Structures are given as structure tokens and as C-alpha cells.
Amino acid sequence: MRKKLLATALGSAVLFASAGIATAAWWSFGQGWGSKWDAPVHPNPATITWGFAPDGTQMAASFPLKPEVTGTSNVGALRSSIDGTYGAGAFDAALQRAMNTWSKAAGVTFVGPVADAGLPFGDAGAYTPDIRIGAFTPVAGSGFQWVAGVGYGPPGDDTNPNYHDPVAGDIILNLNVTFRIHDLPEGAAFNGWENDLEGLLLHELGHAAMGLGHPVSGVPEVMYVGPGCCTNINRIPSPDDLAGARSVYGPSSTPECNNGFDDDGDGSVDGADDGCNLIQMAKEQPQCSDGVDNDGDTAIDHPADTLCQGRWDDSEVSNPGSCGLVGLEAVAIVGLGRLAVRLRRRSPSCGEDAPPR
Ligand SMILES: [Ca+2]
Ligand SMILES: [Ca+2]
Ligand SMILES: [Ca+2]
Ligand SMILES: [Ca+2]
Ligand SMILES: [Zn+2]
């Protein structure tokens, strides 16, 4: 839930986050087990299906938000409004960008839109697709009137039918608020009574797909809600958001050195980060720039630990051939030829052509 808001359906879990989390602010609903899609143990990757509830879909009396909405779902009206202002396809594209962002952040794959049978939100059988997206008109004076959307977290165990939860993963958007697709850079301020559609969807997907709650602090965090949270473009997860998402789903198949995020929070992104030498590299903070004596020889990182071949090396011990390319198996075959060429040119001490040390 986001925007001038005060509580969330899962807010009771969020409150516990204020106790004693010093270095990390992120909060996952499951805290190690469940409240994620697919296998319940953290971290584990997942494939998440999504789709739109057909216009006219009801909300069951049992649905938590039912007292605060009136009428039936009408995503079509919201899409028409957005597309009318920003061009055909703009609404769906903003949603897709938000999903792409999370799939670059952690081990999730989104599949959709898949068909939605149109069962009422909250109906006992309404757990397909995983993410059901609807849009409703709020009841005047209700809490929902003051938020742009509500996202419900994933179920306890998606792989166990006993844990099927029809409310899990639902995202309900407010038909009465103003959504924009601003052409503004990350961090730029906008009219705080409006909503950046992509940023809002990213936040709600953070609940519904990623299983994340509201961290206690951190204005730049996508998942933060509180003073100052919702008046600036926020479409790029913070390092803390990323850590939270990865605690639930593990790393993304997109290498950290090619995802557009400052993964390690040092202020540098991708190729500008000295932990990256090639875009295929899995980590922005490999062993040779992590500030830790990983191999116990008392020398820390490059250049102090002379077995480090660069700040980008992911091994403080000599490891010819790997060149710190953890996760190289994820690299598309088509890129390997060029990669090999670059390795020989830029890292002459690396790989099978390496001279004796
Ligand atoms: Ca990065
Ligand atoms: Ca960085
Ligand atoms: Ca180190
Ligand atoms: Ca060392
Ligand atoms: Zn929220």
C-alpha cells in the first residue's frame, strides 16, 4: 500500500521491523520461510504468473478491502485513461517495466498476462494467476480513498495446495486517484498528490510478488512508506531493497554489472563500479573489493592482496581461468566469443593464455 497511507493489510507484520534491525532496513513478510511464490524456503527463485481481472469482476465479501470499495473492477477504464494521455500501450508498458525491474533485482521470472477466470477477488478458488490485478472505486471516507493501490503478499507455501490463499498476490488500484507516467529522471520531484504509475506498481509488486514489507527507514527505498516517500520518481530499487528481494528469491540471472542498479551501495553503478570489469560479471562487490580478508592471509582486496587480479576479481586466492566470473554460466552463448576476446585483451594474466605467475 502506498501514498499518504497509514496502514496496510499486512501492516501488523511490518511493525515488528522497528525492533533492532540496524544495518539492513528491508523487511520480508516471510523472514526466511513462506510469503514467497514457489518453494517456501528463502532464498529460492520463482516463476510468478500475472494477469488482469476482467472488467466487471466482483470483490467477495470476505476480501479485506471489500468494505472500502464500491462497484466492480475496471482495469480497462484505468488503462484507457492512461493510454489516452500517454499513448496506446503506455499502461501495460509501465507495468511491464516494473516487473522487469524486479526480475533484474532477484530470482523471479514473470509470466503473463495469463487468463483470469474472473472469479470474485477473495473467492475461495481465485488463486490463479498468482498476481491478480484489479481497479476499484473507493468508498468515500474509507482508508482506500487515500491510497493509490494495495498489494497483498504471497502465500505461505505456493507449492502446497493447503496454503493456497486467494487474496495473496492481489493488487487493487484506486480508480479515483491521478496516475502519471512522468518523463522525469529518477529522484525528480513531482506533484505529490499525483502518483507515478510505474513507481507505484513497482512498490505494490514489491509486496505482491517479492514478499517485501515496509522498511522502517530510508526515503530512497522503493518499499519505504512514510514522510517524503511518494513525491519523487522512484523506479530503481535501493541497495537495501535489492538485499531484501535477494533474501527471498536469491540473485537474478541478470549480472549485477549489467542491471542499472548500485547493488553494493557504494554510489557507483555497473561499469562505473570498480568491482565490475565486464558487464557479464555477477557482483559489484566481489571478493577483491569487499573489504574482507576472504582467504585469511591478512591482505585485504586488490591491490593489497596480490593474488587479486583486480578490484573486480571474485577470488582472493589465485584462481586462473575463472577471473572472478561467478555466474558465467548465465551468460548467453552468443556473447562468449566476444567475452573471451575481451578477457585476453583486458586481463592478460587471466585464463588459459595467462603467463606464469
Ligand atoms: Ca549494478
Ligand atoms: Ca556499486
Ligand atoms: Ca576481500
Ligand atoms: Ca586476503
Ligand atoms: Zn506498501
Image (tube, rainbow, N blue to C red):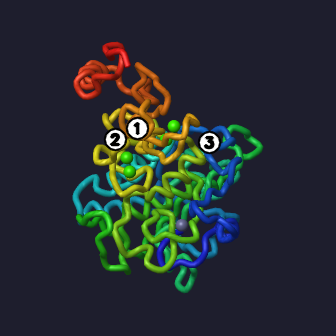
Tell me the kind of residue under disc 3.
Pro
User: Given contact means CB atoms under 8 Å apart, are the residues at marks 2 and 1 in contact?
Assistant: yes
Task: Say which label, 3 or 2, has the lower sequence index.
Answer: 3
Cα distance between the residues tagged 3 and 2: 22 Å
Front residue of 287 and 54: 287
**x and y percentages locating residue 298 in the rendered image:** 54, 40
Q: Is residue 61 visible?
A: no
Tell me the kind of residue under disc 1.
Thr
Quarter the C terminus occupies: top left
**x and y percentages locating residue 106 in the rendered image:** 49, 44
Q: Image point 31% across, 34% down: which residue?
A: 278
Q: Which residue is mark 3?
A: 43
Please indicate whether residue 157 sits to the left or right of residue 181 in the image. Answer: right
- Quadrant in the rendering for residue 274: top left
Q: Which residue is mark 2?
A: 258
Quarter the N terminus occupies: bottom right
Q: Compared to 61, does 304 lie above or below?
A: above
Q: Which residue is mark 1?
A: 254
**x and y percentages locating residue 284 in the rendered image:** 41, 44
- Quadrant in the rendering for residue 313: top left
Label 2 beta carbon within 8 A of ligand 1: yes
Q: Image point 42% across, 36% down: which residue?
A: 282
Cα distance between the residues tagged 3 and 1: 16 Å
Task: Say which label, 3 or 1, has the lower sequence index.
Answer: 3
User: Given contact means CB atoms under 8 Å apart, are the residues at marks 3 and 2 in contact?
Assistant: no
Front residue of 33 and 147: 33
Q: Secondary structure at mark 3?
A: loop
Q: Which mark is residue 207?
A: none
Label 3 beta carbon within 8 A of ligand 1: no
